[in-house]
Structure formats: structure tokens, C-alpha cells
Image (spheres, rainbow, N blue to C red):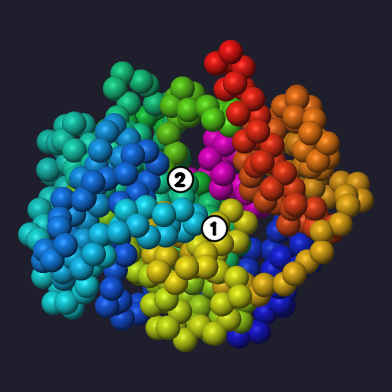
Amino acid sequence: MEFKEKNFFKKGKIKDNQIEDMKIVTKNMSLKKISESEIFFVPLLQHKGERAFEIVRVGQEVRKYEKIAQSYGNISANIHSPVSGKVIRIMKNFLPDGSKVRTIIIENNFKEEQVKLVKREVRELRMATSEEILKIIEEAGIVGLGGAGFPVAAKYNIKLEKIDTFIINGMESEPYLTADYLLMKNYTKEICRGIKVAEKVLRPRHMVIAISEKNKELVSIFERMAREVNIDLQIKVLSADYPQGSEILLIDKITGKKIQKGELTIEKGVIVSNVGTIKAIYDAFFEGKPLIERIVTVSGEEVQNAGNYKFRIGTPLVHIIESLNITKTDKIIFGGPMMGNKVKEPSTPIIKGTSGVIFLNEEKIESKNCISCGRCVEVCPMNLIPFEFSEYYEKGRYVKMLNANIFNCIECGACEYVCPARVPLIESIKNGKEILIELINLEVES
């Protein structure tokens, strides 16, 4: 398959002030499957908060959907076995971000033996209480599938808070990724029913699903299905500009409310959930399924078997490479190419928050001094001046970075992508934030 742009990051090309999305590679493909891996690496930390603790031992036989790790503390999530087989080892292994965490390694016996699932009818939703639904979500180990990975049961436990707007995020603005598009296209009814489950818990005044203008064909499908399922769902079509799918930008665009980086959206009466999260809620309530699999986009430069695949959680990178006969493995990113994690270890597994596996050509690009062209300013969605952060960081002027609102940066990477001098802007911003946090903490302690 030929690509117009041979190296996605080489030129930092934008068109009509938009970063090229490269979604055409996989958008019109049907859902694909590959053979299951012989070995699964299931991390006990696939979410924000505390890691789960294993409740199985080495040598134990497990079944598909069986809970193998128990959540710990208020912010955590249960972990379930993606297959039937034997626990052959429990050890530290890599996460996509490069860190190591305790991991349950399961040898697949390919028998697909599973625990009995408790399925529910629509009428049971009418009788269910918020507490019962939250318990079902918690037991299923559902976390935000848009990448943030926050445990949904904790997020939806709003207590006495009033939710004005519940936003379902279907923007998927990262280049190459089309997994959410396929999900919305193929599972519209399930998503609408999942929204109905969430509505029972959150009791929002308004519910809005955000869809990219490039996916306008989905509008009529959701309108029809919302009427069938009987939910009052507004559909908001937004520009496809990256990073429009960012939670902060989405809330601003739909509600006009300004959320500062680090501020809880619930304080503004807003909750945002990715469409994949909503589908997982449907699966948990109506099908009785815990979260053990998700749709992932496999794409990139010169990838012959690109497409959207249903992968089970714990599928290692090496199995994907070998099964799809991928030969170009210079640069592998889990997630999207802008905000995802560069992965090197072959045992790194698909986790709950993995939306894509992107293969890019690695090319050494010489970083030069800023030429003050202003392109980074033009593309910054937060109206910041990114080249200032790089300058302040290099000179150790951290207070100036603070005064320039560095903590409003959402680290989307658009500035660095379009920079013709290839100034490492995001590195400066991340390091600057870390230093500022340390200085602030020292000030508080003293």
C-alpha cells in the first residue's frame, strides 16, 4: 500500500491548518480478527490509581472472563482473564509507557472455557438502582477507553453532584485511528443502550454525542437509533481539527465552559466518556461481560495488513507483528502518533486503553534552533506560545514558564509536529512542568 507521506513526522505537513489524519488507510475496512496468542501478558495496572492485586496463583487454571485480580482502594479496577488456560508466571513486565508492573502471564489452552455470564433484559434496567449499576460497572473492570484509563465506577459515583451535560466523545482526532469510527458504525444500537445505562446513573440534564465532520454519515444512524432506544441524545458535529477530541476542548466547544488543566470536569457539571467506554458499559450490563477485549487500529507507513482488529487484553506486540507479517518495525507507537507511547519491548501487551498500534518509519531528524516562524502558535489549541516554553526551559527561567501558563498545555504534540526546525518542544514542556511541580512542592513543605 502506497502512502503519499512516506514519513509522518518528517515534514510536519498540515493542510488547511489541519494535521493530515491518514485515516483513509483503514476507515472503510471491515472489522478484522487474527488468531489468538499462545501467551497473554495481563498487567495489574491498566488504569489510573492503585494497581489491582492478583487473586490467582502460578499453576492455577483460569477460565475466560474469570476475575484474576481485585481492585484496591477507591481508584482502581478489576482485571479478568482474556482466555482459558494456566497461569504460568506472575512477574514484572512492560506497560506501553515503558514502566514495569506486576503482570499475570497466562498460557492459552484454546478451549475457550468461560465463566457463566449474567445477561439482562432492557426491562431490568428500568428496575435497577444507580448503586446496582455502579457495582456491575465496577465488577466488569471498566476504565476510560479513550486513553485516560480512569475507573468508570469511581468517575460515575457522583453522589449528590448535579450533572448538567454528559458528553459522549466520538471525535477520535488522533491521526490514523479509526477504531471508534468502526465501533460507532457497527455497534450504534449497543452504544445507545450503553448511554441509557449511564443516564440512569448520572441523571444529566443534557446528553450530547460529538462526531467529526468527516463522519457525518453517522448522524442519521444515531438519530434513528436514539429514537428506537428512547434516549434524548443531541448530536454535535464538530470540525475534524486535531486535537478537537481533547476533553478540555470538547467541553469548551459543546458547553462553553472553560476547564483548566487538572481541574475536575464534575466541578463544572460535566462528565465525558469515550464511545468505547459506553460500549463496554453495554457489554457489562446487558451481556454480563467484563472488559477483556477492545477494537484497536493497526496502521502506519507501508503496513500491508492495516485495519481495525478485535484484540484481547494482554495480547503481546510480538504476536501482532508475527501474525500480520509486519516487517517495518522501526518505530512502533501504542495509541496515536501524536500522544501515544513509543514501544520497543516485544512482550508489551495491548491494555484497556490501547486504541492503536501504529508502525512508522524511524528517521533521525536534526534538531535546530527556533527560527521564530510562529507555526507552533498557529496550531496550538490552547492559544499558547510554545516556542517560549522551549526558550525559558533552556535558560532555566521556570517562573516565566509558569507565568506563560505552561500548565494549560495539554501536550497534544501539534506544535512539535509542525515545527520546521524540529525543536523538541514537548520535551521542554514536560520537563518544565516536572521541575515546576518539584519547586512548588518544596515551597509548600518549607
Seen from the viewer's position, the closer of residues 322 and 251 is: 322
Element type where label 2 sits in the image: loop
Magenta span contains residue 317: no
The residue type indicated by label 1 comes to Asn
Relative horizontal placement of residue 131, taking residue 389 as reference (left or right) = left
Residue at image position (37%, 30%) is: 204
Q: Which residue sits at x=57%, y=28%? A: 259
> How many residues crowd around disc 2 within 10 Å: few (fewer than 14), some, or many (20 or more)?
few
Q: Give the Cα separation between the discs numbered 2 and 1.
A: 13 Å
Return the x and y of residue 335 as percentages of the image width and height. Answer: 51, 59
| Residue at the spot of label 2 | 148
Q: Is residue 28 above or below residue 208?
A: below
Identify which residue is drawn at 34% across, 69% down: 315
Can see residue 92?
yes
The structure residue drawn at horizontal position 66% and vertical position 41%, both measured from the top left corner, is 431
- The quadrant of the rendering that contains the C terminus is top right
**Stretch of the chain drawn in magenta:** 234-255
> Is residue 251 magenta-colored?
yes
The percent position of residue 132, horizontal first and vertical second, equals 16, 35
Residue 352 versus residue 393 in the image, above or below: below
Q: Which residue is mark 1?
A: 341
**10 Å crowding of disc 1: few (<14), some (14-19), many (20+):** some
Tell me the quarter of the image containing the N terminus: bottom right
Q: Nearer the viewer, residue 258 or 54?
A: 54
Say whether residue 287 is visible: no
User: In the image shown, does 31 or 211 lie closer to the viewer?
Assistant: 31
Direction left: furthest residue: 116
State which tag comes first along the sequence, 2 or 1. Answer: 2
Q: Is residue 261 left or right of residue 62?
A: right
Q: Is residue 76 above or below residue 328?
A: above
Count of labels in the image: 2
Q: Amino acid at mark 2?
A: Ala
